[in-house]
Each structure stands twice: as structure tokens, then as C-alpha cells.
Amino acid sequence: MDSLITAAGRALARGDVLGALRRVALRNDAPALALRGIAMAQLGDFERAKALLQRAARAFSGKEAVARARCAVALAEIALVSRDLAWPARPLETAREVLAAHHDHLNSAHARLLQVRRLLLVGQLAEAERLMRRLDPSPFTPLLRAAYELAGAGIAIRRVRATLAQEALARAKKAAQEAGIGALVAEIDEAASGLQGPAARLVSRGLERPLALCEVEKLFASDALIVDACRHIVRRENTVVSLSRRPVLFALAQTLAEAWPGDAPRRVLVARAFRGRQADESYRARLRVEIGRLRQVLRSVARLDATDEGFALTARSQRGVVLLAQPFDGDNAALLALLSDGESWTSSALGLALGASQRTVQRGLDSLAKAGKVQPVGRGPARRWTAPPLPGITTALLLPVFSPSD
């Protein structure tokens, strides 16, 4: 490799994008195209970056398997940053295997971290943790170590482990400072400050207040019966009942939790669960069936009793029942949570991240657009959606976590 390519690569490694471009801007050989593609990606021109990296991958010969694998990893990272979650994961795993086979362990680890970050976005938390356990960060460069700690912080936040998240972010900041990349330090500082913001709202006995992530962690450690509207689960201590695939049952549980310690009238339950206007005999019969199903799935953590007006939820705990709601109101709070990261998303990527159909996501986006909370960019298949960042919101808690059985 010639001296200009080496110098450009070192410039990119320390964050000097313009310095790298000055060295390779007029060259069209494969290594120069790859470096130019990475530089354009760092400048935010993802379409140009993709085109350059694809040209570079084609220009490398069949004997240059490592170089082609590095291009594949770079393309996967561009897809991830631009929230193109529909890109196939297999080429990235193939590239990682090639890099590992040729003892390029640092780039192989970088590919593994990209896999972890994608799994976090689409809610596959258990698989992300499994891949993280395969990584040994001891030989990592400061930049790679910062990325590793950021991924670990993301997992800790999603697991509602505030202390572990703070410790991981502190280590990430130290590594980023060693790498000397100011933009990365600023990103980590922003993530750390977000931990102090509201992660959810606590609703109990008709009152509500915001909770930081550390307070949510303490609530999970208590014996309270928690109806978690962020993840569509009902939990008490170590017992977790997932209702993420049973929206009617969760709507009933949420309505009962809001009414606790009183009862929820039948007309309110019908309106919330079935969107019925009147609790006629047909709806009342359907309500009895669904209440029976809910009573069965919650039997280990709570009791459901019929009252003269409706039904009441009785917890098997001293603290009683609390509802953990989104930090802001609205049916499309999860969409806003994803879009508040400042990135532009396609409707298909939003659907993958939320586990919802594209039609459902599109209806939510149209509603938010009418309210002026999001805006589209582009037209047709190239249309993306953005929203202004919501300061002080620990949005990662709002993202769904899909278990292997879901």
C-alpha cells in the first residue's frame, strides 16, 4: 500500500476527514475509492458513500478478500446509520467471517458490533447480548473500545439497568477522549445526559409523575404490580407476563391499572379494548370472554374481580398496582421515540423496529405529520421521516423488546 493511502487511512482514523480527502480525492484506484467512500459517509453523504464503496468492492480483485470484506462492513454501517434496517444481515456475517479467518480481528470485532447495534434497533435484545459476550475488548483500539462500551450501555438501558449504563458510558467517554475524537465525546455526553431525563411516567391512584431510568430500575426491584405500557408487559418482581402480541388483553390490563384501586366500568373497558360506543349485550359477552383470558394469564401476579359496575384488579403485593406509561401522551409515542434520535427513517424500517405492519406505521406517521410533529423528506420509495430531537428523553426504554417466542 502506498504512502498516500496509508496517510489517508490514518487521517480517517483520527477523525480528519478533509485531510484524508485531500490525499485521495483525485484517485480512482480501489483503495482510494474505499477511503473516499468512508470519508463521504463521515460527512453524512450516504448515497455518494455507498456508490464509492460499491465501486471499490468491484474494483478489488478476487484475491483481495479482506479489502472486499471491509467494504461490505462499511456498507453495512452506512445502512445502519441511515436506518435502512431492511438490508440483509448475511453479507455482514460473511464479511466478518472472512476478516476473522484472515486474522483482521479489529475489523471483525467492528462488524460484530454493527450486528449488535442492528439487533438493538429491531428489539432482539437476547441475541445482541449473546453476540456481545463473544467479544473480548482487551485488544481494542480506543475508538473500537468506545463503540463497544456504547453498545453495552444500549443493552443496559434496554434492560433498565441505569447504574450499569452510567458505568459503560463513563468508560466509553474515557476511550473516546483517548481516541481524540471530539464528535464522539459529544455523542457520549448527550447519551449520558439523557439518562437523567424522564424515561416513563408513573400513574397510580389518579396521579402521575415522570421517572428517570434509575427510578424505573428501583420500581422494577419493588414488589409492585407494574403494567408496563412501554413494553406491553405485566410484571411483579421476577415474574413477567408479555402481552405484546395480545393488544386487547393489554388494553384491558392498562384500563384496570388506571382505575386501581377502584374498578373500571364495563363501558370504559369496551371503549378501550374494542372501541365500541356502547356496552351492549354483544360487547358485554365479548368482554367476559377477554376478561376470562386476562384472568388466566395474570393468575400468578394478580386477581380480577367482577363488581357491580365492571371489573377491578387486585394485586398480590403490598405496594399495589402502578401503570408505567410513555413519557409523553399519544397513540404514536413509540414512533416519536424512534424518530427523536434525529435520524431519518423509512416507514419500513420503523415497522421493523416496532414489530408493526408498514400500513400501521404509515397511519401513525400521517397522524403525526398532521399534528406537525414529524415531517417527510423526499417522495415515493425514497421518502424518509424525521422529527426534531426531544431533549431529555431516555427514548431507548420505549423501544420494544422481542423475546424469542414472540
Image: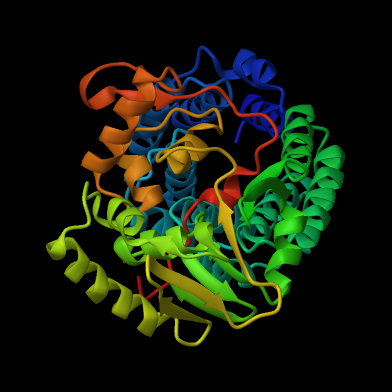
Name the colouring of the figure.
rainbow
Tell me the residue at 68%/69% (across/down).
220
Horizontal side of residue 274 vs 213, given as left or right: left
Horizontal side of residue 6 vs 361, given as left or right: right
- Which of these two is toward me, 22 or 48? 48
Horizontal and vertical percent position of residue 353: 40, 49
Horizontal and vertical percent position of residue 230: 52, 54
- Which of these two is toward me, 111 or 323? 323
Horizontal and vertical percent position of residue 51: 36, 26
Horizontal side of residue 360 vs 25, given as left or right: left
Quadrant containing the C terminus in the rendered view: bottom left
Tell me the residue at 48%/61% (across/down).
401
- Which of these two is toward me, 251 or 42? 251
Residue 298 figure quarter: bottom left
Tell me the residue at 71%/65% (across/down).
219
| Residue 232 visible here | no
What number of labels is visible? 0
Horizontal and vertical percent position of residue 87: 33, 45
